[in-house]
Amino acid sequence: MDKKFPISPLGRLEEAFLSLAVRKPALTLDGSDFGDPLPPGPTSLLELRVLLLRRSTPFHIRDAVIGELVRRASWDEDWAVAVAGLLLPGLRRVAGKLTRRYPADTHCVDAAVIAGFFDALKTCDPNRSRIAAALVWAACRRGHELSRGDREYAAHTVEADVEIGPVPLADHPDLVLARAVGERVISAVDAELIAATRLAHLSFESCAEQLDTTVGALRRRRSRAERKLVPYLRTQIREACPISG
């Protein structure tokens, strides 16, 4: 008798997406609202996924489509599943990378990635640029943290060209980056790039593919951002641990 393996959480997410894609009435977007390469008239979820995965599809079209789905997801959970299904190739890719590092329970890794994705979806700005990459990176970071089951990130240091030692701050590194964005030290995109490559350990190749740029360009961008971040972190350290006398 053949041994049957349980379907993974990401596999169940794909099943849920396919069920939405073929149900009657179907969930569709009017391609006329977005322009080429979307066809005019109702466009199915399966058509959307194919079109969004094409490298020739402009990023502003991808952002517009995902942004509209994010708006709809705020009031209808079916559209939330639709967003996840459209971005499932990216979620599978980051889950696969995490699984190679934490092979004990791949289903737990999948579940953590999915949880991180839907948490990020709740607060995602539908008007932001590179929205798909932001959602996938958030899912990867959460998946990394939850699958480890500890607070190792709290001791993580930002490695830059200048050695600054551990950052003695109690905040989660994501919060430190968020505060740096809020104080306009670095941009939101730069913070996500640092988080994705430093904290979630995504490769530059994976990030470059999602952002449709080169590995070299991303390396230079992160280096510039971290050079801005280093003096900011030093200031935070001095304020947190003032030297008396």
Image (tube, helix red, strand yellow):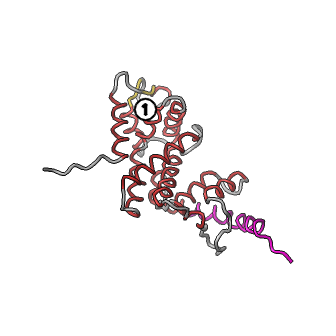
Question: Which residue is under mark 1?
Answer: 38
Q: Name the foreground residue: 86 vs 172.
A: 172
Residue 37, percent across and down?
A: 43, 34
| Residue 169 coordinates in the image, percent (x, y) | 68, 64
Quadrant where the C terminus sits is bottom right
Tell me residue 46's x, y (percent). 36, 34
Q: Residues within 10 Å of mark 1 (few under 14, many from 20)?
A: many
Q: Residue at x 56, y 57 (%)?
A: 193
Nearest the viewer among 101 and 86 is: 101
Q: Is residue 25 above or below residue 79?
A: above
From this view, report whether residue 39 is shown above or below residue 149. Answer: above
Q: Which residues are magenta?
A: 219-245
Which element is circle 1 on?
A: loop
Q: Is residue 30 above or below residue 125?
A: above
Foreground of the two, 19 or 34: 19
**Above/below status of 27 relative to 179:** above
Residue 132 lies in the magenta-colored region: no
Residue found farthest to the bottom:
245
